[in-house]
């Protein structure tokens, strides 16, 4: 998705390019991989699976996949048949198209099992969602998007955001995106800004001013608010939080239709999110109470 709008630029930091772009570069004619451990076939197969995850529709033809990943159609045809034989793709002879198959879910569920940060946060975010009728979430940055990795919906209202695990929000202009950008190293942030400028065109300067205002808000209060962002009628509030490895790569956030999340409620939830952040970061730094045992670290 983002790679289509990210042109190769010699001025960009090579280390900051996405793994997918790095893999794709290794497929070019005449390219010799510097890493002798790099398995080109495996990378191609994973790129094809990612194509389905980021596509706007469920079913895709071989030609569509080939155009997206930038590989020859006969090559893609061999890969999708292999993925089908392993159960990761399902082929419809009537449609002559492929879609992801159920076994792919096992990989996603396996990836979530060790995500103890989410498990620590879930009860706190669910409590906020229920008490204040909001959407509460944990997000991380995925290229130029904020990716929802934990979502808690209010159980007592139908007025909630239609977001779930795997949903994406823009980095630019949203409270969640600003929180994810706030503590990035300057060099990495400059690369992201370059690509966001390409994506948003003439709207970028306005969005950049909103991001900078959000940084000031985080510095002053510890959280950032956004009004009628993402869509025209959504308000949000977010705080950056450190991962288990200590890197500030996640964002705690609450959002709701503007009528249900006025400024005074945003500030209230901002301080609630800060309390959760401090509690969880204390556990990350100091470990759980001795009575909890090693299984709860």
Image (cartoon, helix red, strand yellow):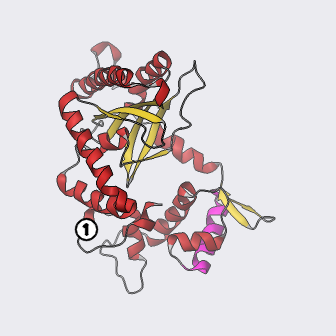
**Direction bottom: furthest residue:** 30
Q: Residue at x 55, y 29 (%)?
A: 160
Q: Quadrant of residue 59?
A: bottom right
Instruction: From the top left corner, tell me how far across and down residue 148 is, in percent.
Output: 45, 40
Foreground residue among 25 and 137: 137
Counting from the top left corner in percent of width and height, residue 121 is at 39, 26
Which is more toward the observer, 295 or 282?
282
Q: Is residue 82 found left or right of 47 in the rendered image?
A: right
Does residue 38 appear in the picture of this structure? no
Residue at the limit of the structure toward the top, as seen here: 291
In magenta segment, residue 82 = yes
Q: Quadrant of residue 25?
A: bottom left
Give the overall secondary structure of the magenta segment.
helix
Region in magenta: 72-89
Which residue in the protein does label 1 denote?
Answer: 12
Q: Estimate the x, y position of residue 185 in percent, counting from the top left.
A: 19, 50
Q: Is residue 16 shown above or below 126?
A: below
**Is residue 156 placed above or below 153 in the rendered structure?**
above
Can I make out residue 176 in this image? yes
- Is label 1 in a helix, a strand or a loop? loop
What residue is rendered at 63% in x and 57% in y? 57
């Amino acid at each position: 998705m983002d790679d289509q709008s990210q042109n190769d630029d010699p001025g960009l930091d090579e280390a900051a390019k996405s793994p997918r772009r790095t893999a794709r570069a290794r497929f070019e004619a005449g390219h010799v991989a510097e890493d002798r451990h790099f398995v080109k076939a495996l990378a191609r197969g994973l790129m094809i699976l990612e194509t389905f995850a980021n596509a706007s529709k469920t079913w895709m033809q071989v030609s569509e996949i080939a155009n997206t990943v930038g590989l020859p159609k006969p090559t893609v045809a061999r890969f999708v048949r292999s993925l089908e034989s392993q159960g990761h793709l399902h082929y419809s002879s009537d449609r002559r198209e492929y879609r992801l198959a159920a076994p792919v879910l096992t990989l996603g569920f396996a990836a979530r099992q060790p995500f103890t940060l989410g498990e620590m946060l879930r009860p706190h975010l669910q409590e906020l969602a229920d008490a204040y009728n909001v959407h509460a979430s944990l997000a991380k940055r995925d290229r130029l998007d904020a990716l929802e990795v934990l979502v808690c919906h209010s159980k007592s209202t139908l007025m909630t955001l239609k977001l779930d695990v795997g949903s994406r929000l823009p980095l630019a202009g949203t409270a969640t995106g600003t929180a994810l950008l706030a503590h990035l190293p300057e060099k990495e942030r400059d690369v992201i800004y370059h690509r966001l400028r390409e994506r948003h065109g003439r709207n970028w300067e306005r969005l950049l001013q909103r991001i900078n205002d959000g940084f000031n808000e985080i510095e002053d209060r510890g959280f950032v608010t956004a009004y009628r962002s993402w869509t025209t009628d959504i308000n949000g509030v977010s705080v950056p939080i450190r991962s288990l490895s200590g890197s500030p790569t996640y964002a705690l956030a609450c959002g709701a239709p503007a009528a249900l999340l006025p400024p005074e409620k945003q500030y209230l939830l901002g301080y609630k999110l800060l309390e959760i952040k401090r509690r969880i970061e204390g556990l990350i730094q100091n470990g759980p109470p001795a009575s909890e045992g090693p299984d709860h670290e």
